Image (cartoon, rainbow, N blue to C red):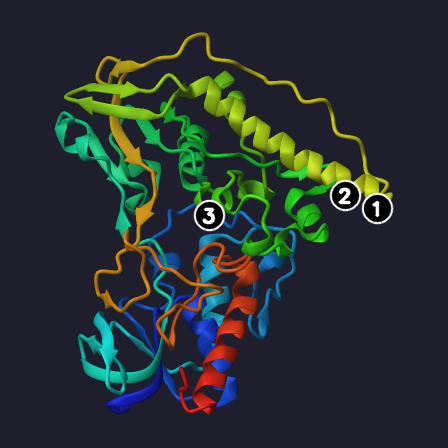
Amino acid sequence: MTQPLPSHLPVIIIGGGQAGLSVSWYLCAAGIEHVVFERAGKFESWRNNRWDSFCLVTPNWQCRLPGWPYRGSDPDGFMLKDEIVEYLDGFAASFNPPLREHVDVTRVALHALGYVVETSIGTLTADQVVIATGGYDTPIVPPFADALDASISQMHSRDYRRPSQLPEGGTLIVGTGQSGVQLMDDFHLEGRPVHLAVGPAPRSPRKYRGRDATDWLHEAGHYNITIDKHPDPIKALTQTNHYMSGRDGGKEIDLRRYALEGVRLYGSVAGGQGTRLDFLPDLEKNLDDADRSYLGICRQIDAWIEAQGIDAPPAPPFQPLWRPETEITAIDLKAEGITSIIWAIGFRPDYGWLQVDCLDDRGRPQFHRGITRAPGVYFIGLGWLNTWGSGRFLGIDEDSRYLAEQIVARQKAGLAA
């Protein structure tokens, strides 16, 4: 039977994913009383918001949660969805966190006793609050989507599970972040007609000069660069993740090759109405920019190999495999046989419930290493909280340990601001 909660707690963590539970792991070790509220079930986004063929994009060895590194037999492989959930469930079971599932937090605000936290099971107060809700609250769908013909089935990538969900005929995937290109690959491998609206996302090599590119970059210290030492922090914070895949043991995603294999490529979606969809004339530019990013990573690895005197096989010369003959700026969806669209253009966070002075004028969190200007309010699990690994399995341990140290120190100091 679940024990009733006290009306006041030293720490409340909002979000029961890997980030929130990693902070909980350190607070449990330090003997700090706290509770973790999760509005669904633990690891909900991994368990129920991923498609069937989903797998990690980074190698298994990068899974390094507190006290729970990857223990499997394939450190260089890429866990499938069910294996990821099993790994995460094992982490939670390893220390039995004070987790309350299916509790919705509806308001956090300043209070005489620290912070008031209103929830679906009642109102509590806390000395300190950790926000571990991530940035994937509201799926982004363009406003003109409602103006498209009702005969065109539409879906956001969050709701996609498998190609058979979509009607027969061609499917247009909009977006070339990691989700968009992997969904495109799903349809392509099943032999379904697939079209892809190519955005400005960069791409990365998978295997390069005998090793996974992420192995080289980790060894070279690339993932240890902090945001305050990054040569271009604005680009780091705003750029879409580089696309590649962990499918079938890991593979590179070169959209030019897919074009040669029959995938129809267009530029960025610009608008639409009825059965007409408009595109920007930026396909070639986006492909070239993605290749520049790819080659930039290759050069970084080459420089590291040379500086260390490593004997590694040479890379073949790079040559673009395909170029568009023309920029297509509009199509008729029905004429092209397209019966469905999947919007894979990301999410927006929703902090409407957070009534604390820790957001900028656009509603985005402001912090340094997760510490906000509101005393005792912290963020965890967001990209570039400190390094590239923040928000990923690789960096969660370091980030959560650092925040837990600040929380413990402030608690022991009597909550001095």
Q: For the residues labelled 2 and 1, say whether their Cβ atoms are less than 8 Å apart.
A: yes
Instruction: Decide: few, some or many residues near mark 3? Use Cα within 10 Å; few <14, some 14-19, many ≥20.
Output: few
> In the shown orientation, is residue 399 left or right of residue 347?
right
Residue located beneath label 3 in the image: 237
**Distance between the Cα atoms at labels 3 and 2?**
25 Å
Q: Position of residue 321 (x, y in %)?
A: 58, 17
The quarter of the rendered structure image containing the C terminus is bottom left
Mark 3 or 1, nearer chain start: 3
The quarter of the rendered structure image containing the N terminus is bottom left
Q: Which mark is residue 304?
A: 2
**Distance between the Cα atoms at labels 2 and 1?**
6 Å
Residue at 79% x, 31% y: name it: 314
Pair 3/1: label in front: 3
Q: For the residues labelled 3 and 1, say whether their Cβ atoms are less than 8 Å apart.
A: no
Q: For the residues labelled 3 and 2, say whether their Cβ atoms are less than 8 Å apart.
A: no
Q: Which mark is residue 308?
A: 1
Q: Is residue 165 above or below residue 354?
A: above
Q: Amino acid at mark 2?
A: Trp
Q: Position of residue 40 (x, y in %)?
A: 28, 66
Hey, which quadrant is residue 81 in on the image?
bottom left
Q: Helix or strand or loop: what does disc 2 sit on?
A: helix
